[in-house]
Amino acid sequence: MKKNSKEEIIQAAIFLFNTKGFQGTSVRDIAGKAKVNVANIAYYFQNKNGLLEYCFTHYYEEYLKELEKGMAVLEADAFACIKKVVQNIVHFQSMNLHLTRFILRELSLDTQVVREMMSTYLTKERYLLSEILEKGISHQEFKKVNINFFIIQLKGLLSMPFLNSQYISEVLHLFPHEKYFAEKYILEITSWLEGILIPSSKTLKQYNEAVPPLTLKNVPVRRSKQKQAGGGSLRYILERH
C-alpha cells in the first residue's frame, strides 16, 4: 500500500467524477486512475458512496473554516466582515476548482448525502451569513435588505464561475483557478456589495469627507482693476480651478 494512496484515491475520484459523473464512475475506474488496488478504496472509504460522502464533508469542513475566519471582524465592522468572507470563499474555491465544481454540481441533485449537507453545513452557512446581515442592519451599517434573497444573489455570484468553469474559460477566456481572476472577481463582488448594502447617505457622507465643499475660504480671489459702472469699490472675481 502506497504511503499517500488515500490522497491519490481522492484526487482520482474528483477527476473522474468531474469528467464521467458520479454514476458513470466505477470503483475500478478510480482504482485504475489512482494506481491502487480496489481493496485500498474499501479500506479507506468502504465503497464509492463513502468516498462521495468524504468529498462532501471534507470540502464543507474547510469551506466553513474559511467563512468563520472572516467572522472574526464582525463586531468591529460588518462590511469588512462580509468582504473578508467573500475574499476567503473565492480564494478557497479557486484553489480547489475541480472539487468545487463537482460539489456544486452534485448539490443540484436530490440525494441522501446532499440532504445531509443541506441540514448541517449549509444551514450553518446560512446562519453565519444571516448574522453578518442582521448585525449590519441593526447598527445601521447596511440598508434593510431581504436576507434570504440577498443570500440567493450572493451564493449565485460565488458559485457561477466555479460551477461553469468550462464556459468561463472557453467562452469568456477567463480562468477561475488563477490568482488574477480571484483578485479581480473579489473586487467586482465588493462593488456589488457596496451598491446593495451601503446606505446612500453613508456613501454621500464619505464622498463629502473626501472632497470638501467649495467655500469662499478656500477659493482664490483676485481684484479686478475694472471699476463698476457708477464708480465705487472694486469687484471680486472668483477663480474656479
Image: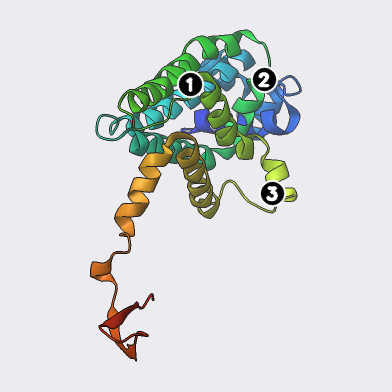
Closer to the chain start, of discs 2 and 3, is 2
Q: Tell me the kind of residue under disc 2.
A: Ser
Depth check: give the residue in front, 8 or 84: 84
Residue drawn at the location 52% of the way across and 52% of the way down = 184
Q: Secondary structure at mark 2?
A: loop
Where does residue 216 sit, x and y in percent of width and height?
Answer: 27, 68
Q: Is residue 230 left or right of residue 28?
A: left
Residue that badge 2 annotates:
108
Disc 2 to disc 3, how far (Cα)? Answer: 22 Å
Residue that badge 1 annotates:
147
Q: Is residue 32 left or right of residue 81?
A: right
Depth check: give the residue in front, 103 or 68: 68
Vertical order, 30 against 229 (above or below): above
Q: Tell me the kind of residue under disc 3.
A: Ser
Q: Secondary structure at mark 3?
A: helix
Give the position of the C terminus as an image quadrant.
bottom left
Closer to the chain start, of discs 3 and 1, is 1
Binning the other alpha carbons within 10 Å of mark 3 as few (below 14), some (14 to 19) or many (20 upward) gives: some
Vertical order, 58 against 82 (above or below): above
- Please give the label number shown on residue 169: 3
Q: Tell me the kind of residue under disc 1.
A: Ile
Residue drawn at the location 41% of the way across and 36% of the way down = 199
Q: Secondary structure at mark 1?
A: helix
Where does residue 204 sit, x and y in percent of width and height?
Answer: 39, 47
Q: Which image quarter: residue 125?
A: top left
